[in-house]
Image (tube, rainbow, N blue to C red):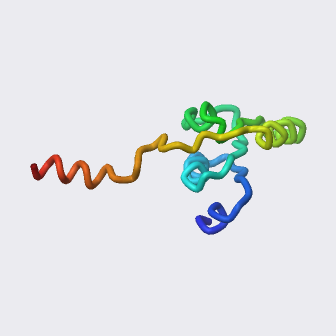
Amino acid sequence: MIQLEKNAAFVITDSGGVQKEAFFFKKKCLVLREQTEWVEIIENNAGVLSANNTEKIIEAYTSLNKLTPNFDNLYGDGKAAEYICYRLLN
């Protein structure tokens, strides 16, 4: 699944975990839900929400193609464990 996400042009999912993985791989995501726990993905133009009917999905796909996503370090730089260990030991 990770390989598929990594090599995809974009991701379509209803999974919260896959939405976040798509973000980490710098892939736009069409979310087949009317709301998401990862609102920051939507707010940073990295994803679009869609109801699960054909018209809404096509509309969301069109919107997705027009987005210029912000994939900056929204979730940190990946060095939290190093920082925590350093702080605990020093």
Image position of 60 (left or right of 33): right
Q: Is residue 10 above or below residue 2?
A: above
Q: For this rendering, which residue is in front, 90 or 58?
A: 90
Q: Is 40 left or right of 75, judged from the image as shown?
A: right
Q: Residue at x 60, y 35 (%)?
A: 44
Q: In the image, what residue occupies the spot 26% across and 55% down?
A: 82
> Residue, x 81% and y 42% (percent of image)?
61
Give the residue at the far right of this rendering.
55
Which residue occupies 80% across, 36% down?
63
Q: Quadrant of residue 2?
A: bottom right
Percent across and percent down for residue 4 are 66, 66
> Residue 56 location in percent, x, y?
84, 35
Residue 48 x %, y %: 71, 37
- Is the N terminus in the top left, top right, bottom left or bottom right quadrant? bottom right
Rendered position, 70 above or below 10: above
Q: Of 7 and 15, which appears nearest the observer?
A: 7
